[in-house]
Image: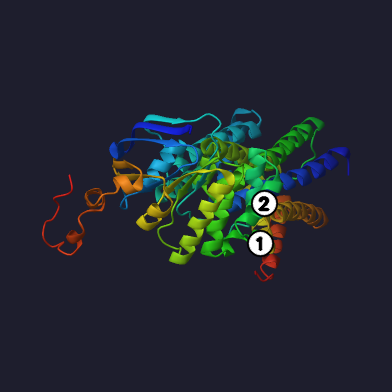
Amino acid sequence: MNINEIYFLILALISAVATGLVGSFALMKRMTLAGDAFSHVALPGLGLGILFGINPLLGGAATLVLGALIVWHLEKRSGLATETTIGVVFSASLAIGALITPSEDLIEALFGNFAPLSLEHFLIGLTASFLIILFILKFKDQLVIALFSPELASSSGINLSRLNLLYLLIFTLTIILGLRFLGALLVGSLIIIPAAASRQLTHQLNSFLITSSLLSAASVAIGIFISRSYAVAFSPAVVSVSAVIFAASLLKKKR
Amino acid sequence: MNTILTVKNLTVQFDGEPVIEDVNFELNEGENLTVIGPNGSGKTVLLKALMNTIPSRGEITWAPNVRLGYVPQKIEVDKHLPLNAKSLFAAKAKILKTSIKDITTVAKTMGLSPDILETPIGHLSGGQFQKCLITFALIGKPNVLLFDEPTSSIDRPREEQIYETLHRLQDELGLTLILVSHDLSLVYRYATKVLCLNKYGLCFGVPSEVLTTKVLEELYGAPHRYYHHLHEHNGHEH
């Protein structure tokens, strides 16, 4: 392994921890389906980036942020229309993205890649990971009260609209972070599946958060090992491992 | 005694329709104000307007240094949240930067055992959950407690118990209470002031003085109306 592969490995593990934390709250906020499919919004941006020869990640980030703002706006209303709109926008993004992305790049855009990282990209990724982890640690209490009761949250002086926007932006950053490794199709899965498995195992908030992060990191570690040992694609290996972990978690009887 | 709250010409509208219109009252420190009125008369809306969590017109003036605690009538909690009361209380204490020690004291006053505090909130009984909501409201040492009475889900003896607890807390902590209630007997027992709400503030003052038969009939409708509802007896409505 050269140093750039080690960068990749370290960043993949640390971003998995961040992903597990963000995923725990996505699960509690019951945005699993939307959260999973949200990453599809990145694809048109990735495609445009490749077409115009700019960094595809920047393009993906741009469409994701736009998508997050749309979701935030729709979240303020409620009802079936929101779910439907989100569903339509996400799948349409996938279709349009697949159309405009050059076919030789499509597989990588959809499924990511195990590619050695430059020091610069490593440091940017590391900063983003720590930003995500710090956000969750700092806003954990507000998020918890808002989950318990939006009404009590606002009566306790929490600005709900701002909190929701911040969370969505952090969620978006998590997707951007994972985009390179896991691709637009599967990055959402690593946010949701380890948290879902962790939820089977514990009723207690802090242990839920920690378990999600550990399971996420374990999925990435085992996925990397499998993909290197058996020369299979990295991202499907990681997500499959997390799915196996989830299946195993179902064996535990809930109290 | 110091005035803690002054409300002048308070109006709340939803989609252009007034829910509360031109309500006026004043409250002193340490008083117990009970708000009564039929369903849909805007009692809960009034509490929310007082907390400034919904937009309103008119004047709401709280005394400086007022700290509000709020117990909602009913909240829909996601039963699957991996959350117990202890973590929930700790979260509020951290936001308000008060010590966790206070919580233990408050929880003990409310009769919440360590076992209950460790139970996931989705597994609590109605009564335990209600006590948790009150405890949650008391974190951060509020000097005003707004309490929206649960209309169902709590049986009569337990309701009495909660009122006695609130009354005791009021004495121990020097709280000002603003309660929404549908139970007139409780108004007579504990309230120092009563506000009758039917969109407009129909009456305000000391219960024994303002709660006349005429006011109550106007508030809830004439009793005989319910027996002869096939005939038009809407004379008291405007």
Is residue A71 placed above or below A186 in the rendered structure?
A: above
- Residue B85, image quadrant: bottom right
Q: Residues within 10 Å of mark 1 (few under 14, many from 20)?
A: few
Report x, y in % for residue B8: 35, 30
Mark 2 lies on a secondary structure that is: helix
Mark 1 lies on residue: B113
Mark 1 lies on a secondary structure that is: loop
Report x, y in % for residue A204: 68, 58
Is residue A159 placed above or below B79 in the rendered structure?
A: above
Residue in the image at 22% along x and 52% along y: B217
Figure label count: 2
Residue in the image at 80% along x and 33% along y: A118
Q: Can see residue A120?
A: yes
Q: Nearer the viewer, residue B54 or A134?
A: B54
Q: Can see residue A243?
A: no
N-terminal label among 2 and 1: 2
- Residue A240, image quadrant: bottom right
Mark 2 lies on residue: B105
* The residue positioned farthest toward the left in the image shown: B231
Q: Residues within 10 Å of mark 2 (few under 14, many from 20)?
A: some
Residue in the image at 52% along x and 57% along y: B130
Q: Chain under label 1?
A: B
Report x, y in % for residue B36: 35, 49
Pointer 2 with pointer 1, Cβ within 8 A: no
Report x, y in % for residue B15: 31, 38
- Residue A197, image quadrant: bottom right
Q: What amino acid is found at the position of numbered circle 2 in the picture?
A: Thr
Q: Is residue B54 left or right of residue A246?
A: left
- How does the figure colour the protein chain or chains? rainbow
Question: Which image quadrant: the N terminus of chain A?
Answer: top right
